[in-house]
Amino acid sequence: MSRSLKQTAREVFTSKSGFTALVILAGILCLSAAAQFYVPFETVDKWNSPQFWQGLPRLAAPSWSSLLAGKNLPQTILVEKMDFLKYSYIIEQIGVKYITLVGQFEYAYDGFPSELAAVVEATYGGDQPLMNIRLERPDGTNVTLVNTAISNPTSYLYLSVDSETKARTLDFLKSAGSNEPKAVYPEVVLFAAKGANMGDPSMNSVLKGTYRIRIDVTTTGSRDDVDAEFRVYGQVYGLAGTDSKRRDLLVGLVWGAPIALAFGLSAAILTSVFQALMGSLSAWYGGVVDEITQRVTDIYMILPFLPILITVSVVYRIDILTLLSMVVILSLLGGMTKTARSMTLQVMTEQYIEAATSYGASRRRILLYYIMPRLVPYIVANIVLAVPAFVFLEAALSLLGLGDPRVPTWGKIIGDAHAGGAAIHGLWWWILLPSALIILTAAAFAFLGYALDRVVNPRLRER
């Protein structure tokens, strides 16, 4: 067996295709290793928690896309609690407390924000506090964004879609002498230079400079307090962008690598080894064993593999381990069983098998120590060729919505992109990045399989 493995390794390392495959696989393995350090498992565990990702922009392109666009696209600006200056005073005669939060940020980007939001955390014991949020632009104009009561200890105000904010933004447009647009986008109007086309994102220009956000709160409790964050969401984020649920796609891509490799390798190794063993047993023992094994193999090979998996996935909500078990069970017998049987029949006619039989070696010993080692190159080649098939299978099931919804996989990301209309809306990074990794993984194993042809194909070996 050691000689076969050494020969296999030598052929892989000395061929161009094998070396290319190893370089690609090394990169994917490094990506898998990075998952353990760059992204802690707690982050992956919250992949489906919407609140965890609220600080990230929605549908943001990768940061490096600014180089492709040729301009400085906006990144998310976060004015945190500690960035606000807080002032408060109490008028005891009327029992009213005033709290003012003032924060500022520099906006020097060439594009407009994608969204505006505020997060207000209030502590109060009596009546609901009244809150007013205003934005002061670099040109000195003050625009009231919202004037409302604080109804929850933690309030998420999505100003870009808030009806009151849109109405006040429209009033600001009219006062600035701008034409009334068909739709009002506060994140565009509030950051646009004044002009006739102030409300048109395609014709206006960005007003760069220092913006100030002011939050005034009126409350009746002397111990009441308020803290806030103001979020100016950008158009780009990170190395891989975000999806429609604000999730960092780099997390899914990084953790998708070990999941894809573990799923593909586990399924390929288990099925290939078992099929080879069953094929050898079939040929070695012959008779009824051979007949039963071959007929069951024929049945396995004509079973509708994917429809069975889809049916079970629909009826039972499965996880990644259950999916792996089902794939292995449905692949216990197959093409490798036939190949191993034919190879075993050839090996049985060689002289060293007759010599081992003559000195009294048991049938099990001959099978395990004399026949199976001869099949190792074929088993390895079959494993290499089966891995991308299983990776594609998991991706296909996830694309159909039948994978494990709790873990981020490349197929799940593509499935979410399809459901979110990424292709229609030009969200290329949402589709291209996971698809490229799947194709790259398949290509690596294809190159590796081509290199192994020199081991398992006698004609190539003679050349």
Image (cartoon, helix red, strand yellow):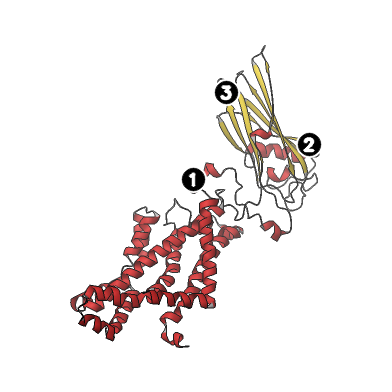
As measured in the structure, the alpha-carbon distance from the residue carrying label 3 to the one carrying label 1 is 33 Å
Q: Secondary structure at mark 1?
A: helix
Instruction: Give the residue pinned by disc 2.
Output: 141
Instruction: Name the mark nearer the viewer: 3 or 2.
Output: 3
Relative side of 332 to 249, left or right = left
The one of 356 and 284 positioned closer to us in this rendering:
356
Residue type at the position of mark 2: Thr
Q: Residue at point 35% right, 56% down?
A: 322
**Quadrant the N terminus occupies:** bottom left
The one of 75 and 449 positioned closer to us in this rendering:
449
- Which numbered disc flags the more N-terminal residue, 3 or 1? 1
- Which numbered disc flags the more N-terminal residue, 1 or 2? 1
Q: Quadrant of residue 352?
A: bottom left
List x then y, in percent, for residue 246.
Answer: 57, 48
Residue type at the position of mark 3: Tyr
Around disc 2, counting alpha carbons within 10 Å, would you say few (fewer than 14), some (14 to 19), or many (20 or more)? few
Q: Secondary structure at mark 2?
A: loop
The numbered disc on residue 42 is 1
Q: Secondary structure at mark 3?
A: loop
The numbered disc on residue 124 is 3
- Which numbered disc flags the more N-terminal residue, 3 or 2? 3
Residue type at the position of mark 1: Glu
